[in-house]
Image: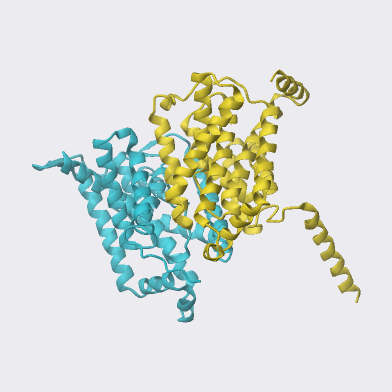
Amino acid sequence: MAVFDSIHLFLQELIGAYYMQLIILVGINTIMATSLNLIIGYTGQLSIGHAAFMSLGAYCSALVTLHLGFPFLLSLLCGALFAAIFGVIIGIPTLKLKGDYLAIATLGFGEIVRIVCLNLEITGGAMGLRGIPKKTNFVWVLLAVLFTVFILNRIIKSRIGRALVAIREDETAADSMGINSTYYKILCFGVGAFFAGLGGGLLAHYIRFLHPKTFDFMKSIEQLCMVVLGGLGNIWGSFVGATILTVAPEMLRSVADLRLLIYGLVLILMMRLRPQGILGEQTRLAPFFSQKIRNLLQKRTRTNT
Amino acid sequence: MFIQQLVNGLILGSTYALIALGYTMVYGIIELINFAHGEIYMFGAFAGLLLVTVLKVPFFLAFFLAMALAALLGMTVEFLAYRPLRHSTRLAALISAIGASIFLQNLALLIMGAQPYTFPSPVEAKVYQTPFFTISRLEIIILIFSFLLMIALTLFIQRTKIGKAMRAVAQDKDTASLMGININQIITVTFAIGSALGAASGVMVGIYFRTVTFSMGLMPGLKGFVAAVLGGIGNIPGAMMGGILLGITETIGAAYISSQYRDAVAFALLIMVLLLKPTGLLGRPVQEKV
């Protein structure tokens, strides 16, 4: 994969290491936000433990790289599958729960994963896991983002996706239409966890140091905010949300102390002014603008008459 | 040994129960997980600390003043962050609550800094020995105060007119407003009471563990929420029971399983209860209308 490295180095030379890092983090966060959007935005299941799947993927892929010497792609795959298995295991019992009860169960699961990672020997415990080789670069992240968005897009536009949306709209009605809602919810949890694990693996081989604190409750909340800010049920929205919430804290570095204060304020104001998110549920930009223009024209004709 | 753990768990649990009450009351009325509640608890601890150390207010008075200030803060948060979102989706309100939580926590960090503060002890340390367990004077005071507050709340909700209105709003908002109940006023009162109870817990935990920090609200906030869900969210006796059950399970888990896993024990208990009884221990099953 020397080609990937040289492309990465060339681009880094072009834009500088700082912006390169930012772009890579935007990419990883996009994977996290889009996969969470499948669970929350499309299927309507409020999960606030997405960072737990990320940490499972991160630790698993880092450990197979460190101890078994797996090649990068294989270790990413291991991490993603490991997270997906847990997604299904957790999904089977908890998805019987509804709404806020599901949310609190996923929160509890996230905390348990964090505490177990903090106390296991193999994960380095409170010392964290060190010495992970740096393998993630721009090209890997780009490929992973494209892969994630492509697969999720295919799922959403297929029979499965329509079933998921039906469950979101009305689970009872969906059930009575012959949709096996439990099966689809578990499937969606598994797929979401798979991509979260992929994002975790990429992060592990990028920051090269893992600590359970990286994947705490606030991380899950941050990912939830990305999804809601961009627009629920909108893959492109998640990309926009991930970009803004990754870049904005960096832009606010000049007011370091006020950074999170502003972050909190923006969330409140955003919900007040545009609760449907920046893009809303509109998946394409073109109809969004054409609708605006049509409205404008209509207004004009109305004033003319 | 076992009885000692039970007593310790009861003390910890009673502070959880006070936090859980705030969550459950708000949830019962507007179905919102008030994420900023942990921060109100932290604010209460700081308010108590500053009143005692800077303004030299006597402890007893500072305790109630901190509760009153926290009630004021709770009402303000409700007015600014939740009321405008009353008719939007629940997720939007939840995100707004998270925003309020992040804002308040970082405001505290900005004003008070990251260092932990030490709460002076209000009573001289004295430990009572009984054949089965030991208990300090402070622990007895915490237990008495918590239970008095819980009894007062129960009486308030069962016996007063406002309490009756609160129960009516929780049951059916539209019908309640048709009966002439001012919904907004009731919601404000609910936030005020919930926040005051949270602050009471904050002050007592601050005194008990002798430390107050800007981030102290996060974990107890989550635990309080867990306690509320354990008992069946929206259910007031359930929150008290859930809090005490959680405290006892946690201390016993820490003593007999592993102290490093004490938080994990709490969350594992939560998931197990939810699996066996999805609406909590005292929660009524929700009838689905089609």
In the picture, the quarter occupied by the N terminus of chain B is top left
Left or right for A93, reference A6: left
What chain is the cyan one?
Answer: B
Closer-to-camera residue (B142/A12): A12
Looking at the image, which residue sits at the far front? A178
In this view, A215 is above or below B149 = above
Left or right for B266, reference B176: left
Residue at 41% across, 48% down = B221
Residue at 49% across, 76% down = B174
Looking at the image, which residue sits at the far left? B131
In this view, A65 is above or below A115 = above
Closer-to-camera residue (B165/A206): A206
Closer-to-camera residue (A96/B96): A96
Looking at the image, which residue sits at the far right? A304
What chain is the yellow one?
Answer: A
Left or right for B182, reference B19: right
Q: Position of residue B70 (x, y in %)?
A: 42, 55
In this view, A219 is above or below A67 = below
Colour pattern of the rendering:
by chain
Q: Is residue A75 visible?
A: yes
Q: Position of residue B143 (x, y in %)?
A: 23, 51
Residue at 36% across, 42% down = B53
Residue at 72% across, 56% down = A282
Circle count? 0
Q: Position of residue B73 (x, y in %)?
A: 47, 56
Q: Position of residue A133 (x, y in %)?
A: 57, 19
Q: Is residue B12 visible?
A: no
